[in-house]
Image: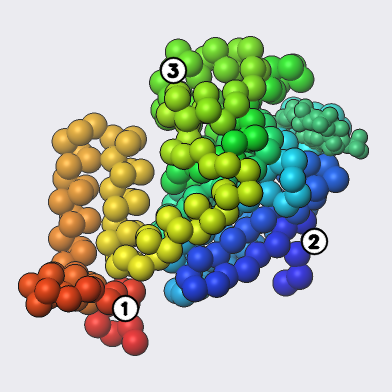
Amino acid sequence: MAFENITYGCEDGIAVITFNRPKALNALNAALLAEFCEALEDVENDAAVRVLVLTGAGEKAFVAGADINEINRLGPLGAKRFARRGAESITRLTRLPLPVIAAVNGFALGGGTEMALACDFIYAAQSARFGLPEINLGIIPGFGGTQRLPRLIGPAMARELIYTGRMVAADEALSIGMVNRVCPDGELMDAVQETARVMAAKGRVALRAAKQAVNTGLNVDLESGLALENDAFALCLASPDAREGTSAFLEKRPAVFSGHLDDDER
Ligand code: CO8
């Protein structure tokens, strides 16, 4: 399908979805979210994709939020439907069996910050700005922000940001644990690609198991999380990549992972 509001491409196992409505600072409208879902479907069904990167087109924004023109026209039922659809498509990022990096250039506000929070981690350009300014519009975050931000940076700081709508610059986002790395403007995608390449070369089963263990484990008690890790660890040993990784170490050579889920997949 030809996309109008995003671009999607994949090279050397690294897929990139770019939010592409620069005139509206890449705001998330219904059409964009539908295309985003289609692209995620492709990512999920394409075994060649090992890492997904999300970024925004243009110099100014990653995503400046949900489209306020559309929100302005919604009643409560429409808002519930729009918010649920958006939240569900964003939540799919957490369930994708591969790492997702948010490469945040410029503004990531409202739904933009919420999109980034659903990624595995965030790299930010020096000029990036994060925030949940929904309170200034008389609404609250509706794409998961009230749930994911407190889990990531702690409830007290999350409350302050949600209640005031204050924007934080990239350096502050780094200091409160919201982003993993801040890069000079213009070097963001190189840094993201470098980390993505490192992960893309690892075993696919192991990456999938690690993501599932971390994400599911965050929502259960420690004992259940440890049991889950134990199962996921055992599953890795069924993969050709576990044999390759351990044999390569013993044979003192670099591992070359096939990414096959099992011996039948060739
Ligand atoms: N929606 C629609 N259009 C937008 C949005 C947006 N979120 N953000 C920017 N735009 C548009 C502007 O209207 C403007 O359009 P035009 O040129 O036609 O007037 C264009 O983008 C450029 O924006 P500005 O002229 O405002 O650029 P500035 O550099 O002056 O300011 C800002 C940049 C600070 C980013 C400013 O645009 C801004 O504050 N934007 C809104 C940010 C915001 O409040 N985001 C939260 C939105 S609500 C949300 O995300 C809720 C998520 C849950 C939704 C649940 C659904 C029911």
Callout 3: few (<14), some (14-19), or many (20+) C-alpha neighbours within 10 Å? some
Q: Splitting the image into 4 quarters, where does residue 42 fall? A: bottom right
Mark 3 vs 1, N-terminal side = 3
Give the image location of residue 197, x and y in percent: 43, 63
Mark 2 vs 3, N-terminal side = 2
Mark 1 vs 2, N-terminal side = 2
User: Can residue 116 be seen at all in this image of the molecule?
Assistant: no
For the residues marked 3 and 1, what is the alpha-carbon distance in whole angstroms?
A: 42 Å
Residue 155: give its label.
3
Amino acid type at mark 1: Ser
Element on which disc 1 rests:
loop
Element on which disc 2 rests:
loop
For the residues marked 2 and 3, what is the alpha-carbon distance in whole angstroms?
A: 38 Å
Q: Quadrant of the N terminus?
A: bottom right
Looking at the image, in which quadrant does ligand 1 appear?
A: top right
Amino acid type at mark 2: Glu
> Residue under circle 1?
258
| Label 3 CB less than 8 angstroms from ligand 1 | no
Give the image location of residue 212, x and y in percent: 33, 51
Q: Is residue 152 above or below residue 120?
A: above
> Residue under circle 2?
4
Element on which disc 3 rests:
helix
Q: Residue at x 70, y 62 (%)?
A: 7
Q: Nearer the viewer, residue 203 or 36?
A: 203
